[in-house]
Image (cartoon, rainbow, N blue to C red):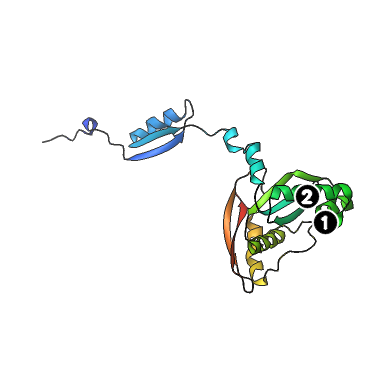
Amino acid sequence: MDTDNTSNRPTYLVSTANLPFIPQVTDHLAKILKRQTVETVFKPATNVAQILPSVKESRQALDCRGIYSITSSCGVKYIGETGWSIKIRIQEHKPCLKTGLVSHSAVAEQQLETGHTILFENSQVLSKASHFYERKIREAIEIHRCPHNHNRDNGYYLSNIWKPTLNAIVRLSPPTPPGAVQSATTVTVSPIYKKVTTTFLLPYS
C-alpha cells in the first residue's frame, strides 16, 4: 500500500498578497500566509509626506479655468466661476476689498458687511471646466450644494427635476476634512437647447 506523505510534496504558492512592510509584523504574517500557499510581496509603507500635497502642487491647482470657493472666517463660502485662471480671479477680489468696491465683488461685500475675515489662502478649486455652459451649470450645482453661501443669486437656472438628485447627494456627502481626497461623480444636466455633462467632486468617506 502506498503511503500519502504530504510532507514531502513541494509547496506551490497560488496566490499573492501585497502588504506594506512593517518590521516584526509583516514578516510574521508572511510566514503564516505561506502555510496557506499565499506568496507575500512587500511594498514601502506610505508616509505623511506622500499623502499631503506640496505647496507647489497647491499653487498649480489654481492655474486653471473652472469653479472655485472662497471661505470667510465664519465658514460662509462664496462660489464663483471663471473662464480665465482661478488664481488670477481670486486675486481680483482683493483690490475690491481694499477699496470697498462691493459692486464688483460679493467677497468684498461679505467682509465689509459682516466684519469677518476672508481666508483667501483657503480658496479651493471645486471643478476644472473650460466650456462656458459647463462652468455655469456646475457653479449652480455647487451653490445648491452649499446653501450657507454669500452668493447674490443662485447662478444658472437648474430645472427642478434635478433638485431631488442634488439634495440626495448633499445629504450623503460628509464634510470634507482638510487634505481629504475627493472622488468624482458625473451628472448630465440638460437645460433647454443645451446638453452638458459635468463632473463634480464628492468628499471621500
Q: Please rate how many residues cluster around mark 2, counting C-alpha atoms within 10 Å: few if below 14, some from 14 to 19, many from 20.
A: few
Amino acid, disc 2:
Glu
Q: Quick one: which residue is furthest to the left in this view?
A: 1
Please report the residue visible at 57 percent of the width from the left and 54 percent of the height from the top: 184
Please report the residue visible at 72 percent of the width from the left and 59 percent of the height from the top: 143
- Judge whether residue 162 can be spotted in this image: yes
Please report the residue visible at 71 percent of the width from the left and 66 percent of the height from the top: 156
- Judge whether residue 205 can be spotted in this image: no
* Relative image position of residue 36 (x, y in whole percent): 34, 37
122 or 205: nearer the eye?
Answer: 122
Tag of residue 92: 2
Image quadrant occupied by the N terminus: top left
Q: Quick one: which residue is furthest to the top in this view?
A: 24
Say how many tags the image has. Answer: 2
* Relative image position of residue 23 (x, y in whole percent): 48, 26
Q: Please rate how many residues cluster around mark 1, counting C-alpha atoms within 10 Å: few if below 14, some from 14 to 19, many from 20.
A: few
SS at mark 2 in the image: helix
Amino acid, disc 1:
His
* Relative image position of residue 8 (x, y in whole percent): 21, 30
SS at mark 1 in the image: helix
Q: Is 94 on the left-hand or right-hand side of 160?
A: right
Tag of residue 145: none
Up/down of 66 relative to 163, above or below:
above
Q: Is 184 on the left-hand or right-hand side of 126?
A: left
* Relative image position of residue 91 (x, y in whole percent): 76, 47
Up/down of 166 relative to 60, above or below:
below
- Label located before the other in sequence (2 or 1): 2
191 or 165: nearer the eye?
Answer: 191
The residues tagged by marks 2 and 1 sit, at their Cα atoms, a distance apart of 9 Å
Q: Is 51 on the left-hand or right-hand side of 175?
A: left
Question: Picture quarter containing residue 2?
Answer: top left
Disc 1 target residue: 104
